[in-house]
Amino acid sequence: MIGILLVIILLTIGSVNTQQINWTRMFYSQLKIPYGTYALKEMLPDLFSDIERNRNTILELTDTLQNPVNFLSVSEKFEISDLELNKIMEKVQEGSNLLVSAHYFNSSMLDTLGLDLDTANVFFGNQIIPLMDEGTQSNYRFSIKDFLIRDTVHIRATDRAFSKDYFVIKKRDIFTYFTDVNETNTRVLARYMDYPILVSVSNGNGKFIISSVPHLLSNIYLLQADGYPFVSYMMSHVPGTKLVWTEFYEIGRGLSNSPLRYILSQPALKLALYTVLGGLILMALFEIKRKQRPIPIVTPPRNDTLEFVQTIGNLYFEGGHHSSIALKRAQFFLEYVRSHYYLETRKMDDDFIKALTRKSQSEKKIIEELVKQIRYINSAKPVSDELLKRFSENLDKFYDYKVTI
Amino acid sequence: MKGILSLYFSQRFFNLLWLLCILFVLAYLLPILFPTILFLLYGFIIFSLVDIILLYRIRQGIFGTRSTPDKLSNGDENPITIHLENFYPYKITLKVIDELPHQFQRRDLVMMLDLSPGEVKYIEYELRPTKRGEYNFGALNVFARTQLGLCTRKFRFSQGKTVPVYPSYLQMRKYELMAISNNLTELGIKKIRRIGHNMEFEQIKEYVQGDDFRTINWKATARKAALMVNNYQDEKSQQVYSLIDKGRVMQMPFNGLSLLDYAINASLVISNIAIKKEDKAGLITFQHRVGTVLPASKRNNQMFLIQEALYNQKTAFKETDFSRLFSLVRNKLNHRSLLLLFTNFESRVSLDRQLPFLISLAKNHLVVLIFFENTEMSSLIEDRASSLRTMYHKAIAEKFAFEKKLIVRELASYGIHCILTSPQDLTVNTINKYLELKARGVF
């Protein structure tokens, strides 16, 4: 019962979690998050008949494309090298158009285009200036109510030819705006109050259409009723039917800039790699199969006699019972003599020594000494280290490995 | 799917693959080699495919079976035979992995052999189980590969066979023959081969070495011109009971086999011989209480009953209660019987506890107490002692060995026969004792 309850609770928590919205900014055409550009990808075919999406740099694009086309990039930052800038300038002169929407641009590009960028003050400039009409701007009195509730603002389109003249956006989504607009070849296409956020810079036969609010192209605004027109508005300023959309400046190249790229570009190395991979896969698939069934480990019963005897021996040793040990060895020796040589051991006289020498083939000297030592041990006098050692050695010499239990 | 499951690649296959890989790296450094190595790669792939086709062309390319005895004999070497046959029209190299019962703990039973087309080969190996019970053989795995040796196909035969391990019936047969044929002297096994000095005449037979020359029948010798002796019948229909202690003391293993199993093997052999000698064999097992009681009998199926009873002996190795045994023997055994009591005493103290019961048993029956030398200690006793500490160890070992001899002497003074034997010689010594007692007509 508790288990079922737990499962239900976990499921509920899980389902709540999945509903959380990812507010990360990532202007990537595969993402359906609010600030992704999946919707843009879906809508562009309405505006251009020939669309190509890739992750190439401007340099690569300008090298490969011959005819004038429209380039599009939507990213957090749009930073290109001087070489790329020169290339794209050439292309634009020839009639291509570059549509860029980003929060930040590198200064050399801005300088070339005669623009400058300023950051919208998030705490002040963005938040407190309320929605208002152009005419009422100067005598508008700011109230605390506006500060609290007005979070959407209007972007004004300056080109009166377009059907709609404003676009709605959340104030917090405007990060930067243009300043120092060079009036000669630059036209402001859209502004928020006095701040241009979409400009068109003519250069030769082509134009740069630059926006500082990439959010306007993200899913969340495109899917609103007022959002879609902005895309149309921005795109309506470029002619032609071909659009090349590079996402390099937002997500980079992805996988393909690894060292593997080089290996894969060399046929020999590529085959070497494939051989290794193929071999490993074959090994994993075929060699991990069992060749015989598993055998559980069963420990066989152990015979602890030796350990037991040694423990007892150590106990005696710690106590230093020399005489007791000597007596035990003597007893065993005499028993051995009785059972192997059938000799009486009660009185160990010269006859005994003679008989034992003859029967055991041992040296007489050893047997004489043994008899003497046993007599001493039996008399219950203290036994020294030296005597025990000597006695033990004599016994070992006597047995000379002949002993059996 | 089954084909894929039985497919393996050989070490040679992978070695060549790694070699190719190295060659490709080499070809990167020396581009001129590249076409050659590419050619080698294609060749390698083609040869591998050909090898697979060669192996799988014939559905049942290899035939194999494992034949095991219906039951295995505990503590003996049991022969196992593997039969292998090649149906491929070419030479095949086989690697055989037999899945042995887990009790053997062997993970390395791998055999390699070559089979020419149509050839039949037998592999024989021996297994020595040390525990009674069910033994489960797994599959016989045969890995076949052609002379290309790139791929391997696995065949599985004789899966899941269960074989019971019985008390040593192999020893039973062996000693049965020896005891009956009076051949034990030849092998130095039987010490007293005279088959009894009862007065009931059985037959006149030719004298052979070892016969008691007091029984020479001179008249018959004169007629035959060869030495002839009278043979007298043994006493018959005497009861022989094997009393097996299943207690704690019998748990000690020697050479993998516990003392209990040695005792069980020996009782099987001795029961068989007793029945063959037309005595009645019975069985009593006991630990903290009496377990099996099989009344002595010499009927035809008695041997079967004893074997099954011995096979089914289970024990918790509890402390043995001799008083229970004594009261049972007192109540159930009305005839004077030979009681072969298999137990173990490690010291005088443990004997003293049971001595009153043994003496009481010996009043009505002929008791033979069978207990064991501790052969584990022999290494300690037989080695030279170098340090003072090892001298102590040695003295203690000698003390234990000596005490066992004292036990024998003490029991003899109460008229109780003893066999003090190493576990390995248990069966032989028991048979000898039985034959000796029979010959002396003690019971």
Image (cartoon, coloured by chain):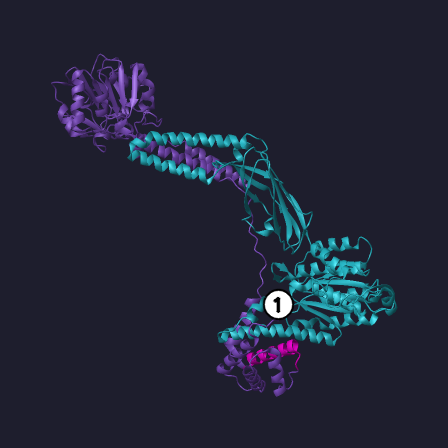
Chain colours: A purple, B cyan
On the picture, is A287 further left or further right than A332? left
At numbered mark 1, what does the secondary structure look like: helix, strand or loop?
loop
Residue B356, position as x, y percentages in the image: 73, 73
Where is mark 1, residue-wise?
Answer: B374
Quadrant where the C terminus of chain B sits is bottom right
Q: Is A118 or A93 nearer to us in this picture?
A: A93
* In the rendered image, the vertical position of residue B412 relative to residue B275, given as above or below: below
Q: Is A318 or B6 nearer to us in this picture?
A: B6
Residue B89, position as x, y percentages in the image: 56, 32
Quadrant where the N terminus of chain B sits is top right
Q: Is B12 or B357 nearer to us in this picture?
A: B12
User: What segment carries the magenta color?
Assistant: A323-343
Quarter where residue A324 is shown: bottom right
* In the rendered image, the vertical position of residue A393 relative to residue A132, given as above or below: below
Residue B259, position as x, y percentages in the image: 65, 62
* In the rendered image, the vertical position of residue A4 relative to residue B179, given as above or below: above
Which residue sits furthest left? A184
Q: Pointer 1 indicates a residue of which chain?
A: B
Tell me the kind of residue under disc 1.
Asn
Quarter where residue B285 is shown: bottom right
On the picture, is B108 further left or further right than A240? right
Quarter where residue A346 is shown: bottom right
Q: Is residue B45 among what the camera can see?
A: yes
On the picture, is A212 further left or further right than A181? right
Task: Determine crowd level at label 1: few under 14, some 14-19, many 20+ residues with C-alpha closer than 10 A.
Answer: many
* In the rendered image, the vertical position of residue B260 relative to residue A95, given as above or below: below
Q: Is residue A135 among what the camera can see?
A: no
**What main secondary structure does the magenta stretch of the protein show?**
helix
Residue A146, position as x, y percentages in the image: 26, 28
Residue B80 in the magenta stretch? The answer is no
Residue A342 in the magenta stretch? The answer is yes
